């Protein structure tokens, strides 16, 4: 089965062709970062205009690179939330037009579920349940995934949800904290990669930043940590010698990584899960990847992390998710909407 995927939820215009939910034939990603960097963050209005300019050429390029013809495409998958509504609309309108013209089934995909499916492109023989840490610009969620989409008649009435959210960010998401701290330290936008790079030159133990103690809860909170870094950078809390930017970045990153690793493995233990997935833009972070790998080895958990290029927003993961929905006989028709906010699955705890 050949699926064309479209992703425009934020500032990447991406189109991909994926075969059988496994082989990426093309994954065109047009980043708008240079444009938004001038403004120090994503400007939604600018993002939608850029998507409009880029989406046509991106579709053509993805088809050309994949080497397939439209007659061979079996379906189209598109992100319809959560994200910037103006940006989502460009991808959704394009997907609807292509589905209509080529008479193809169309499936609307939750962006967070798309992130989870990046691991299914990268790894084989994944056993359910999988506990997923989704760490992106807007989310820090812990989501238990119990399986792929199933045909309606196979879904047990007492367990209808495939995704169960067991933890979430109560305030700033991890990526948001990276971006805001980077901005305060004058590292520009996007902040995550800048902190990741600079932290390698700093001392992660230079400062002991606190992370919120939410007790037994599987939720995250990074807002207090962010403020503590701001105050330390301004010299408010400490009369002693100011820390270098690299030391601040490394110490901040150590605190975030600690919180993410601890909560994730605490959740894995609580739900007796032996497969953990980590996805979303922040999972590109080298220090986080290493710390998760170390803990997985110690605890005998199978850890799945996509290669870096599939961690940040891309359409291949959307096409992969689309493959599994379409294979289960689902279709969205041409009438669905976009959603700025849209939690994945049922929430418990
Ligand atoms: O998943 P993503 O590409 O877009 C959203 O769905 O939000 O995630 C973007 C976020 C940004 O906050 C960015 O700063 C962060 O991921 N990020 C990183 C790294 N690369 C991207 N954070 C830490 N270290 C990185 N290497
Ligand atoms: Zn994302």
Image (spheres, rainbow, N blue to C red):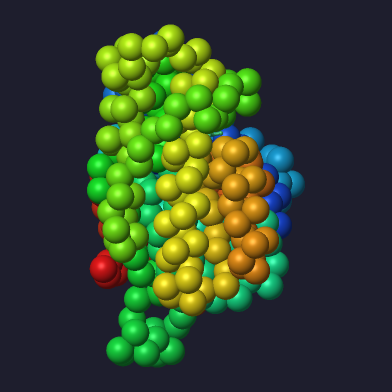
The quadrant where residue 52 appears: top left
- Residue 154 falls in image quadrant: bottom left
Residue 100 appears in the rendering: no
The N terminus sits in image quarter: bottom right
Where is residue 188 drawn, in percent x and y?
45, 15
Q: Quadrant of residue 301?
A: bottom right
Identity of the residue drawn at 61% across and 66% down: 299
Measured as percent of width and height from the top left, residue 255 is found at 45, 38
Vertical placement of 31 versus 98: above or below? above
Q: Nearer the viewer, residue 188 or 210?
A: 210
Query: So how many labels did they put on this image?
Result: 0
Query: At which x and y percent is residue 250?
Result: 53, 27
Q: Quadrant of the C terminus?
A: bottom left
Q: Residue furthest front?
A: 240
Point 27% across, 35% down: residue: 224
Examine the rendering and report whether any part of residue 24 can be seen: yes
- Which one is nearer the viewer's eye here, 35 or 233? 233
Q: Residue at x 34, y 60 (%)?
A: 218
Q: Position of residue 50 (x, y in %)?
A: 42, 24
């Amino acid at each position: 089965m050949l699926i064309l995927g479209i992703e425009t939820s934020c500032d990447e215009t991406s189109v991909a062709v994926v075969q059988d939910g496994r082989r990426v034939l093309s994954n065109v990603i047009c980043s708008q970062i240079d444009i938004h960097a001038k403004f120090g963050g994503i400007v939604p209005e600018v993002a939608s205009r850029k998507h409009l300019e880029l989406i046509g050429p991106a579709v053509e390029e993805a088809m050309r690179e994949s080497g397939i013809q439209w007659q061979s495409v079996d379906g189209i998958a598109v992100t319809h939330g959560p994200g910037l509504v103006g940006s989502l609309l460009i991808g959704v309108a394009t997907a609807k037009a292509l589905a209509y013209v080529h008479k193809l089934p169309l499936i609307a995909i939750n962006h967070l579920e798309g992130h989870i499916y990046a691991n299914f492109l990268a790894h084989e023989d994944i056993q359910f349940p999988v506990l997923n840490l989704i760490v992106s610009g807007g989310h820090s969620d812990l989501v238990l995934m119990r399986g792929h989409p199933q045909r309606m008649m196979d879904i047990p009435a007492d367990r209808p949800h495939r995704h169960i959210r067991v933890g979430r960010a109560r305030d700033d998401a991890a990526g948001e904290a990276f971006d805001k701290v980077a901005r305060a330290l004058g590292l520009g936008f996007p902040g995550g990669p800048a902190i990741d790079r600079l932290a390698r030159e700093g001392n992660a133990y230079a400062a002991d930043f606190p992370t919120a103690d939410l007790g037994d809860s599987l939720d995250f909170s990074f807002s207090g940590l962010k403020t503590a870094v701001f105050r330390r950078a301004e010299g408010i809390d400490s009369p002693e010698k100011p820390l270098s930017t690299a030391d601040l970045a490394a110490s901040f990153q150590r605190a975030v990584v600690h919180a993410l690793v601890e909560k994730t493995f605490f959740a894995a233990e609580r739900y007796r899960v032996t497969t953990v997935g980590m996805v979303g833009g922040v999972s590109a972070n080298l220090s986080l990847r290493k710390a998760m790998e170390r803990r997985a080895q110690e605890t005998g958990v199978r850890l799945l992390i996509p290669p870096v290029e599939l961690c940040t927003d891309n359409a291949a993961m959307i096409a992969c998710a689309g493959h599994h929905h379409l294979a289960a006989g689902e279709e969205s028709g041409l009438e669905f909407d976009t959603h700025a906010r849209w939690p994945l699955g049922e929430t418990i705890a």
